[in-house]
Image (cartoon, rainbow, N blue to C red):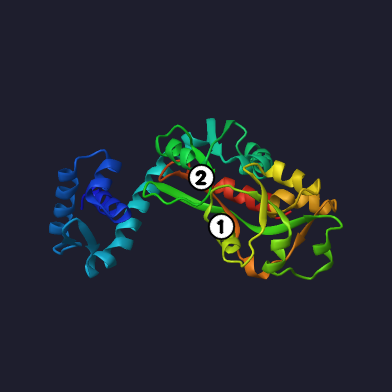
Amino acid sequence: MNLDNLEAFVYVVHYGSFNKAADALFLSQPSVTARIQSLERDLDCQLFDRMGKKINLTDKGQRFLPDAQQILRLYQSSKQHLHRAAEVTGELRIDCTVSASNYIIPQILPRIKEEFPEVNIRLTTAPSDTILHRVLSSESDLGLVRNVIHPHIHSLKLLEDPIKLFVYEDHPFTKLEHVSAELLSREPFIFFECGSLDWVRIQRSFESLTEPPSINYQVDNLETAKKLVMNRAGICFLPELCARREVQEGRLIPVQVPEISGNALHTHIISRIGESTSLAQAFLTAGREALIH
């Protein structure tokens, strides 16, 4: 069985289009079609139902997909083991979001350096989409990003950071066991916007209220948001990790809002499949050990 044909199959499923899969694979659309047809001949079954421009997996295609993904993962994993010695020396290029750089990376890098003393580390901050592109193009070895999905990317969940409402000390909400969403309409808000789906859900929760809160400040920097709250400019939803020190010092107080609970900021470690896998796993282990304290 040809691995290129398996890869084409997985890409077509991922992108839902022969044309988009061809663009991602740097191939022509007829070449992708030919690979799928060759795979179907090898398997002696039809993998896709083609209805005009729309394509859907057949029942056999659905059953085959997990096996195809597993075969590709095993191949890339075997390839990685052959090159493992080379990946723990030289320069380690890490890209991460600004929030990961501020609150996660400083706790992890000393542990990585201790485990891999020969590695020199170069750190760059960028948005998640940019990091994905840089990892795919081998400009970076590892990325710390929001959750992304791509057939050439191996992703490990590092952190699920609960998003909570934070108020300043002596705020009236600190005397309540929990706060109803309706009470929020009376408060000036600082809204931290990072583009993740969890923040969109919170914003939509506001929109569903009869009287949505007044968003006095909309910022894209966590440190700015925290300082505005501590200066009594308003209240704010923030990831728990970024406010840990201020909570310990009593300068920020978390408040329960049952209607807007269950949201969290997810941070994943990504690498190209078959590359930097042992370093990604080391990052995961170091991160989990560091961040639980």
- In the image, which disc is placed on residue 10? none
Residue 265 picture location, percent across and down: 59, 54
Q: In the rendered structure, which amino acid carries the disc numbered 1?
A: Asp
**Dot 2 alpha-carbon crowd within 10 angstroms: few under 14, some 14 to 19, many 20 or more:** some
Where is residue 94 shown, x and y percent of the image? 54, 36
Under circle 1, the secondary element is helix
- Identified at 69% across, 59% down, the residue is 164
Q: Which sits in the foreground, 1 or 30?
A: 30
Residue 251, percent across and down?
83, 51
Position of residue 214 in the picture relative to residue 124 (left or right): right
Between 216 and 68, the one lying in front of the other is: 216
The residue singled out by tag 2 in the image is 278
Please name the residue shown 67% across and 67% down the image. Answer: 181
Q: Is residue 54 above or below residue 194?
A: below
- Residue lying farthest right? 170
**Which residue is tagged 1?**
198
Above-or-below relation of 140 to 257: above
Residue nearest the observer in this picture, 78 or 169: 169
Of residue 269 and residue 206, the one placed in the foreground of this image is: 206
Q: How many numbered marks have been drawn onto this rendered protein structure?
A: 2
Please name the residue shown 85% across and 55% down the image. 169
Which quadrant holds residue 134?
top left
Q: Is residue 235 left or right of residue 34?
A: right
In this picture, is 4 found above or below 185? above
Given this view, does label 1 or label 2 mark the residue nearer the observer?
A: 1
- The earlier-in-sequence mark between 1 and 2 is 1
Which element is circle 2 on?
Answer: helix
Label 1 crowding class (10 Å Cα cut-off): few <14, some 14-19, many 20+?
A: some
